[in-house]
Image (cartoon, helix red, strand yellow):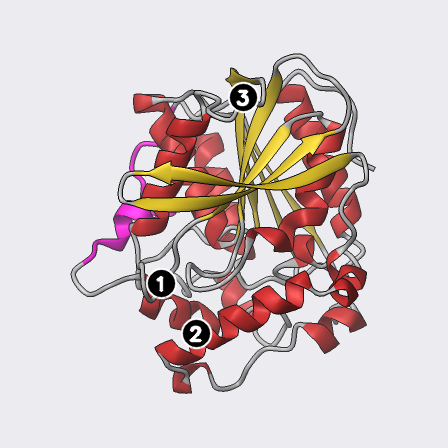
Amino acid sequence: MTTKAPIGARLFLKNRPDWHDLTAADVLAGRAKLARLVASPAMRLIAGRPDPRAHIETRTLELPGRRITLRVHRPDGRHERLPLVLSFHGGGFITGTAAQNDWLNSGLAAALPAVVAAVEYRLAPEHPLPAPVEDARDTLDRLADDPFGWGTDPDRIAVVGESAGGTLAALLALRSRETGPAIRAQVLLYPALDWTETMTDYPSVARNAGQPGLSAAELRFARGFAVSPGFDPTTVSPLKTADLTGLPPALAVAGGLDPAYDHGRTYVELLSAAGNDARFTGYPNAVHKFMSVPGIVPAARPARREIAEFLGSRLRATAPAR
């Protein structure tokens, strides 16, 4: 018997049947529509209200040849040398916005406490891979120096990424062992970690076909725009990395009804086999995107507590998210 997703997820996160018919113009229109939806007050019922113990501000980061917008979550009150958490939204490298993670990021900022900077990295089709990776890398390098005077501690940096953003978080963790800045912990939320032609070959893709939130067709559609002809996708696919030794502690979280479930589970198995501190948690009745829609997927709340506890222990913080 097939497990059904929560009814709210089935109504709100219905999969499109026509991915193969969409154009680049459709991608841009859909991205703008999502941004408007996420910004609407009514969406807070689904996406969750930001934690009142943190405030949100927008900053612009000047990088070589481009500007990156940051959606910054800072805890109320006075604090000494806060940890820095970089957050990367999902959307298959073609859509998504930092604001879709306000509920999660503000809760982490208040609970740890920490400065949580959500990065509006560039997206395809205008900016295919590796542009998002370059944005993640350069943003980390700049923010490690605390250019805005937030009082962050360069020795206490963590990364959090959902879906395609999980790719960015994992790649920064891989890079940190070679060039720094040092990363103390990585959290991968239903990550998509294989951007090669084998992206949809994992058992969970077939097992969870028809569940809301993500489909094999959507994965292939996103890959078609994000991976340009001639680009080697193994360079941005953590699951294809040969050497996984010496990496920061990792927590991967996924919903049991998510086609991408086995991306995170398999990666944690590989990390553990390479001698890293890594664990995977599957939430049985949760779907892809569930951390962005806590109002309709109850598993988001215990998952946020688990994430806060994991980061707290690695960043020497104590209080879990509520």
Find the magenta span and give its range: 231-245
Where is residue 186 drawn, in percent x and y?
53, 33
Q: Which mark's residue is nearer the viewer, 3 or 1?
A: 3
| Quadrant position of the N terminus in the picture | bottom right
Query: Which label number is shown at residue 27?
Result: 2
Tag 3–tag 1 contact (CB < 8 Å): no
Residue receiving disc 3: 149
Mark 3: secondary structure: loop
Report whether 127 appears left or right of 70.
left
Instruction: Name, please, the residue furthest toward the top.
Output: 80
| Inter-mark Cα distance, 2 to 1 | 9 Å
| Image quadrant assignment for residue 46 | bottom right
Report whether 73 appears left or right of 17.
right
| Inter-mark Cα distance, 3 to 1 | 32 Å
Most foreground residue, 50 or 189: 50
| Image quadrant assignment for residue 177 | top left
Q: Amino acid at mark 2?
A: Val
Q: Residue at x 42, y 45 (%)?
A: 68
Seen in the picture, residue 19 relative to 41 is either above or below; the reply is below
| Inter-mark Cα distance, 3 to 2 | 37 Å
Residue receiving disc 1: 124
Is 201 magenta? The answer is no
Q: Earlier in the sequence, mark 3 or mark 1?
A: 1
Question: What count of labels does the image hold?
Answer: 3
Q: Earlier in the sequence, mark 3 or mark 2?
A: 2
Q: Residues within 10 Å of mark 2 (few under 14, many from 20)?
A: some
Can residue 41 be seen here? The reply is yes
| Image quadrant assignment for residue 279 | top right
Q: Which mark's residue is nearer the viewer, 3 or 2?
A: 3
Mark 2: secondary structure: helix
Most foreground residue, 318 or 103: 103
Mark 1: secondary structure: loop
